Amino acid sequence: MTKELEERIRTLEAELARARAAVFAPSGPDVVSVPPEVKPLFDQAAQTIRGYFDKIEIDPARALIGVGDERYLLVRASAFSIDFLDTLVHLYKDRGPRDALAIGRGFLFDIAHTIGYHDARALHEKLGSRDPLEKLSGGPVHFAYTGWAFVDIKPESKPVPNEDFCLVYEHPYSFEAASYLRAGRASEGPVCIMNAGYSSGWCEASFDIELTAVEVSCKARGDAACRFVMAPPQHMAARAREHCGLDLGALGEKSFDIPQYFEHKRAEENLRESLIRLKEAQDELVRKERLATVGLLVSGVAHEVNTPLGVAVTAMSIVEEEIKSLAKQFETGALTKKDLRRFLERALPSSAMVTTNLSRAADQISNFKRVSVDQVTQEKRTIDLSAYVQQTIDSLKPVIRRGGLEVSFTGSGMMVATHPGAIAQIITNFVTNSATHSRAPGASEPIHVSIEVARRGSAVVLIYADDGKGMAEEVRTRAFQPFFTTARKEGGTGLGLHIIHSLVSDVLRGKIELTTAPGKGVRFVIEFT
């Protein structure tokens, strides 16, 4: 009993001595464990920082905890460990436990890495540290004084300012592992995330190279020690295998991946860049698709123009033959009134046929030029909308015939300030879509297409409808999505209706509604001002 009392007295006297000396007086001679060759440097850092933490002021009336000339915070250890991760796993439970845990670990690592980096920068400036190893030496000491963990740096470490950097160390008193143990919780993997983040942030600021740290064993998992390896991210797996015989891929399968500073931000940036590239590629595809419709018109107008030109050439050859015959008779003096009458009877109708068919060809070219140029330029001007729609339909006659369509159009004269190119492109894509996709497999009957133009108050309404095979509901809901098509095998790109939707919303500043059902055809109502 006397011995126990004496031991208790000695303990109380030691605690009193510490209290009299300072709040942060250590209970042992060392606050960091390092290889012998660098111990003098770390001892000097410990002595300097010990003096810094002697200057403490605590005043709850001013919500103040001051150390030196800095203000500090006291935070419950479990708030930044087990409590934080539990909350994040619950908040992201819709992502599944693996992803939710990875998100929580990422947040904690980023926060700690940032704190460690800026704590190091601030202390380097206060202490005037210049050499990388000298800058590092203050980290483990500061780490111990602020309650994160005791640091035990192993001899196999190689703290050099290049890609060969490697730090192998343990945290015997990690606050994160202690939080799990205190709660009676076991973990499948390492839990000392903030310790890894803070130490890698401090070393990154000290050596001016990108670093990360991984806990390879953890007391919260039942291991003997909380052990870490720190290295540049690209060498992390090799260093863990070299110094600890650990395959980080096995940990990664349980969401304990190699942490990288603001990895989710980098992922977002990569995703944003990918989306930009995808948008550029999509815009290029849309541009090519629009030009393809112009090409479709070109092939169609070539056919339409060739027919009247062929008739004109044939008729002109008749006129030429009659002129040659008449000239020969004139030269020989054998020309009679009967011959002249015969010439006029054959040549005049043929020349009239030439004029008529050349006019037809000129009209076709004029219509095509107006519609195709509009489809490319998208400029705004005032047009007779009904007449323009009719011109567009006329330019599509080859497509209409090949698709077995029967197109009717209703609409009276209506002067509208709009984008003719968008109108032409919309009708072209509608007609092409009906010609390509509207007929049911094996069906031979024509598809009746009607196009209407009308006014509804101050708005213009363009209606396009066919009585083809229609769409199922799951297809209708995705009809305007880019690259969605049910005719991929037939060469469909899935851009036709997407282009229409884009033209309506982006160019005409209007809206489009689709009504359809299987076997009931489709009906598109476009309204714009």
Image (cartoon, rainbow, N blue to C red):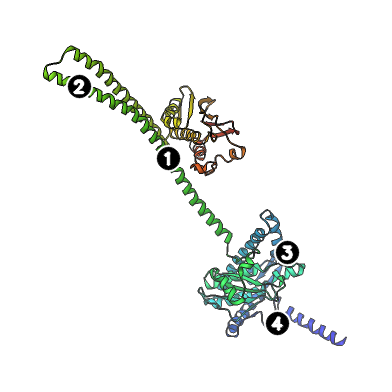
Q: Residue at x 35, y 30 (%)?
A: 305
Picture layout, residue 310 above or below residue 201: above
Q: Nearer the viewer, mark 1 or mark 4?
A: 1
Which residue is disc 3 drawn over?
61
- The numbered dot on residue 167 is none
Whether label 3 touches label 2, CB < 8 Å: no
User: Is residue 290 shown to the viewer in this render?
Assistant: yes
- Say which element carries label 1: helix
Q: Which amino acid does the dot numbered 2 rest on?
A: Ile
Q: Position of residue 77 (x, y in %)?
A: 71, 67
Quadrant into which the N terminus falls: bottom right
Q: Residues within 10 Å of mark 1 (few under 14, many from 20)?
A: few
Q: Position of residue 366 (x, y in %)?
A: 35, 29
Q: Residue furthest bottom?
A: 3
Which residue is disc 4 drawn over?
28
Whether label 1 touches label 2, CB < 8 Å: no
Which residue is disc 2 drawn over?
323
Left or right: 25 in relation to 293: right
Name the N-terminal-most of marks 1 and 2.
1
Q: Residue furthest left?
A: 332
- Say which element carries label 3: helix
Which residue is disc 1 drawn over?
292
Q: Residue furthest right?
A: 1
Q: Position of residue 302 (x, y in %)?
A: 36, 33
Q: Nearer the viewer, mark 3 or mark 2?
A: 2
